[in-house]
Amino acid sequence: MTAGWATIPLAVGGTNQTRFHLVNHVARQLDVALTPASADATAVQAGQRVSVPALGTLDATVWLASAGRSSATSSVVVTATADSGAQATSSVALLLTDDLARNGVGAPWPAASASSYQSAYPAGLAVDGDGSTFWVSSGTASGQGPSTSKPETLAVDLGAPTRIGTVVMTPRVNYGPTTYTIDISDDGATWQTVATITSAANGTVTTSVGPVTTRWVRLQMTGSWDRIQPPRNVQVATLAVKAAP
């Protein structure tokens, strides 16, 4: 049994998934119980069982929930136990955080996206946990930045419906959004506005939006602090999402 990726983020109040590749070397189906063990994560589905076909393979997904620690690193060991008693184990590192949007370790979720970006500054730089990196929308000339007629969006897919309470936007100073909405979605297609910020500070803005359960969170920006107006682009260093208490 091998893990699909080395590390996954796991945030307080959130869940995430890890995948394991199981190989059956015998000429009969194996019914297997998957049991994760960690001080910092619990199984979303207790007693999970899968069937691996004879002389075949199976990719099994294990969902984990945070046990509440908000920083540092940890790990989870998953044991696959066949009904015959045979066992195999594999482990995945956990990046423990209080930010539901944080990734930066190459895991599939949380997944950032944007309406546009510059090649050196993709959306993922806004959720990597590093305040010195930042996303930049595509414009480079005056008038190519966000406006009411052509908003720019920065979004994060949390991977599963999650109960959130707060959204924190930290801009790249002097280039961040001046006006934006915070929108949520269950499917990434239909959006509901839960907050409108009309005069954003040229610095970190923390907005209470919950408690509300959603899978996607986005900023829809219509103005920028860019010194050239109409703005060339908009830039965000960190988009953080915190769970509701």
Image: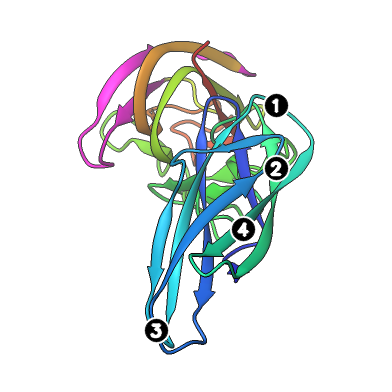
Inspect the image, locate mark 2, and give the three-letter code of the amino acid beneath it.
Leu
The mark found on residue 28 in the picture is 3
Report the front residue among 198 and 83.
83
Residue wearing tag 4 = 79
Inspect the image, locate mark 3, and give the three-letter code of the amino acid beneath it.
Arg
Residue wearing tag 1 = 70
Q: CA distance from mark 1 to mark 3?
A: 43 Å
- What is the basis of the colouring in this image? rainbow
Q: CA distance from mark 1 to mark 2?
A: 9 Å
> Element type at marker 1?
loop
Inspect the image, locate mark 4, and give the three-letter code of the amino acid beneath it.
Thr
Residue wearing tag 2 = 95
Dot in front, 2 or 4? 4
User: Which callout, 1 or 3, points at the residue further toward the start of the chain?
Assistant: 3
- Residue 175 lies, in percent from the top left, at 59, 32
Q: Which residues are magenta?
A: 180-204
User: Residue at position x 59%, y 40% from top?
Assistant: 126
Task: Return the residue found at the far front.
Answer: 84
Task: Return the residue found at the far left.
Answer: 190
Structural crowding at the residue carrying mark 2, measured as other residues with C-alpha within 10 Å and reported as few (<14), some (14–19) or many (≥20): many
Q: CA distance from mark 2 to mark 3?
A: 38 Å
Q: Is residue 196 magenta?
A: yes
> Element type at marker 3?
loop
Relative to residue 53, is residue 222 depicted above or below? above
User: Which callout, 2 or 4, points at the residue further toward the start of the chain?
Assistant: 4
Query: Where, by quadrant of the figure, is residue 196 drawn?
Result: top left
